[in-house]
Image: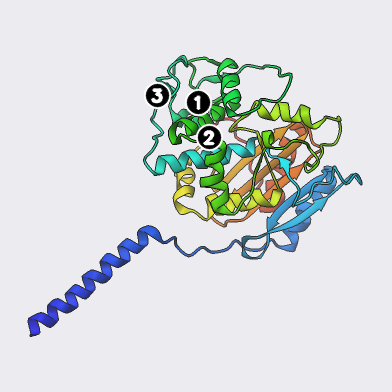
Amino acid sequence: MKGDKTMSKHGLRTLFLVLSVSLGCFLRPTLVWAQVATPAQREAVQHLLLQKHVNGLALINGPGDHPEVVSNQVTRDSQQVVRTNRVIPIASFQKLMTGVAINQLVLSGKLALSTPLSAFYPQVANGSQITIGRLMMHTSGLRNVPGKLAAPLEDEAAQRQYMLKHYRSTGKFSWCYSDVDFSFLAAVIHRTTRQSYQNYLADKVSRPLGVRVEFADHLTNGHRVTQAMGKKQGWSTLQRRMSKEPGAGDILCTPVAYWYFLYRGVLDNPTMLAQYTNRQAAWETYFGGAYIEAPYLHANGYLSGYSCTFYSNWESRQTVMLFANNLSYHELRVVNSQLVHAYFDDHRTEQKQINAE
């Protein structure tokens, strides 16, 4: 009987250990919310927006990882006021969504970062050396070739046909920021999952996170889209430009929706976050839609007068995110470096080496 009792206690301990390990594989650790932005942080961001005459808004940390808004509008035109709940083109911010989708496929074993592009598009020169990882890091050697459209591309099939006619493969695998890398990644998602890139992104990325996005080819007019200031451009003109950028710039969403995508899709997901933070190095790196320079994830987006940028400290989980519609690309680059200074009191200078060997 004593032996039975001993075995019973041992069995219970073993069962408890097995259950603990098993549950640990599926349960995320308890997340600690980011500290709410201080009045000084808010004032610093507000001052920057005023000083730079930004027509737009910044999102900063509120209670429970919800965003608080710092707004500065230099126009009274209601169509040009940047609002938290009105869609705006997010340009290269979309690359992080595409990167998350690719990482999902890698983590599930359906794709590998070492998979060559030639497995999907054997006609691409140097395709056996262009891996999924190189596309994610902008070291593929692929370059965009400009092209004009008389009308927006109608669907993904037309976008892929356009992509295959408007790129060149240099065979040089050093860093070069090329939108076509992420257009090819969108096409790889289509080939791997046997569903459209748009459907996969909705089914596996945005909808599970409670985030709504709009694809440019789904909008028949621009009535719900924040208008850019400066040069007047019709919706059809903007739609043409966006339709050339599948996977890299053909999405619109609200500022608040993108905030929740970043938190729920990356910062709140330790496995996904590790796909990025494990790549930090002595120099700044780029992977899957974000620049990585410890302790920050960072991204920019710019298209036809619309600009956005964010810095997120993955250790403190604090984030500052900006959306504007009156900045040039040069002005965006100036503002984004000052934004990290204002919010994080971090005065580091921009690195010149990215994805250095």
- Mark 3 belongs to which amino acid? Ala
- Mark 1 belongs to which amino acid? Thr
Q: How many marks?
A: 3
- Residue at the extreme right of the image, as rendered: 76
Alpha carbon separation for disc pair 1 and 3: 18 Å
* Disc 1: CA contacts within 10 A as few (<14), some (14-19) or many (>=20): many
Question: Residue 158, located in which quarter of the rendered image?
Answer: top right
- Mark 2 belongs to which amino acid? Ser
Q: Mark 1 sits on what residue?
A: 139
Q: Is residue 313 visible?
A: no
Alpha carbon separation for disc pair 1 and 2: 25 Å
What's the mark number on residue 119? 3
Q: Are marks 1 and 2 in contact (CB under 8 Å)?
A: no
Foreground residue among 174 and 64: 64
| Front: mark 2 or 3 | 2
- Relative to 85, say whether 176 is above or below: above
Q: Are marks 2 and 3 in contact (CB under 8 Å)?
A: no
Identify the residue at image location x=50%, y=28%: 135
Identify the residue at image location x=7%, y=85%: 1
* Disc 3: CA contacts within 10 A as few (<14), some (14-19) or many (>=20): few
Question: Residue 14, located in which quarter of the rendered image?
Answer: bottom left
Which of the two discs, 1 and 3, labels the residue nearer the N terminus? 3
Q: Mark 2 sits on what residue?
A: 196
Left or right: 350 in relation to 228: left
Alpha carbon separation for disc pair 2 and 3: 18 Å
